[in-house]
Amino acid sequence: MRTRTREPQTLAGAGTLDRLARILAARNIDPTAATAAAASDEPEPYAPLEALRGAMVPRYRDAVADHPQVLAWCREVAAQAVAPGLGGRRQVATGPSLLMAGVVGAGKTHQAYGAVKTLVGAGVGVRWRATTAADLYAELRPRTGVDTERELAAVARVPLLILDDLGAAKASEWTEEITYRLVNRRYNHMLPTLITTNLAIGDLRAHVGDRVASRLTQMTTRVEFDLIDRRRARAA
Ligand SMILES: Nc1ncnc2c1ncn2[C@@H]1O[C@H](COP(=O)(O)OP(=O)(O)O)[C@@H](O)[C@H]1O
Ligand SMILES: [Mg+2]
């Protein structure tokens, strides 16, 4: 009997087309532009927000950041954005990071995706990636035929990273090491990172280790979310 093979897991855990859309959007290429241009000679209007929405998982496509600290972070990152050349669009360069802490369902991931949209809406070019810590560890497990070092380097260097649910995966020396290498590189290069966690600060320190916790303390501003589970509140 043949078993159906599953789609290869991507960082965001979606299929190939979604992945392609994400890659194009990350490079600020509208995936519909190529076919539209082939069909007519009219130049297509450039719609970076639409391309961005298409690259986001459906759950958070319509997310709007409204948390004051998140919006303040967007302004700082936008202010530090740099144009690669004369007349080029300003791109996310260096910037502060946020540690968004709160209970499950508080709206942390919503604010993180919303922040990417805010930046793009402000005219800033954003190459970004989103992954849960658990997916990242799975992606980086050493296995034959996959250059996991390259994958780690890519995640470490992407201008804007959403690292979701840090502390939710089972900890081991190996996950601690991976987290350290990732956070240390982003710390050294001062790359803006949106980290979410539902752990209290002491528990997070125990989970990620002192070296990571110390860097996070310096590189992030802590954003505390209200003690509301929006998923349950909606279902009730
Ligand atoms: N400001 C908001 N407005 C509307 N819906 C929201 C808002 N924040 C969160 N949600 C919704 O509430 C649910 C939980 O939010 P989520 O960001 O996934 O929580 P967390 O990441 O903290 O566990 C999701 O369905 C999300 O779409
Ligand atoms: Mg979340």
Image: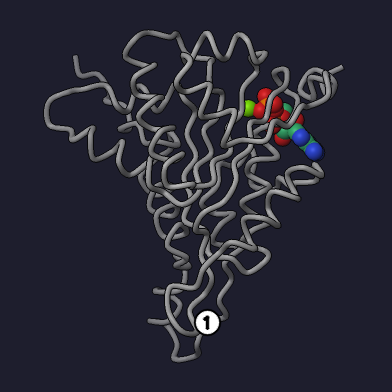
In front here: 214 or 156? 214
Lateral position of residue 228 relative to residue 74, left or right: right
Which residue is drawn at the image coordinates 67% and 13% (left, top)? 200
Which residue is drawn at the image coordinates 61% and 51% (left, top)? 116
Vertical position of residue 45 compared to residue 28: above or below: below
Lateral position of residue 99 relative to residue 4, left or right: right
Name the residue at the left extreme. Answer: 144
Lateral position of residue 173 relative to residue 127, left or right: left
Numbered circles on residues, count: 1
The x, y position of residue 230, in whole percent, is 80, 25
Type of amino acid under label 1:
Glu
The colour scheme used to paint the residues is one colour
Name the residue at the bottom extreme. Answer: 41
Q: In which quarter of the image is ligand 2?
A: top right
The x, y position of residue 126, in whole percent, is 52, 58
Q: How crowded is mark 1: few (under 14 residues within 10 Å), some or many (20 or more)?
A: few
Which residue is drawn at the image coordinates 52% and 59% (left, top)? 92
The x, y position of residue 70, in whole percent, is 73, 44
When asked about the image quadrant of residue 198, the answer is top right
Quarter of the image where the C terminus is located:
top right
Lateral position of residue 227 relative to residue 70, left or right: right
Quarter of the image where the N terminus is located:
top left
Q: What element carries label 1?
A: loop
Which residue is drawn at the image coordinates 41% and 49% (left, top)? 158
Residue under label 1, please give it: 44
Mark 1 C-beta to ligand 1 under 8 Å: no
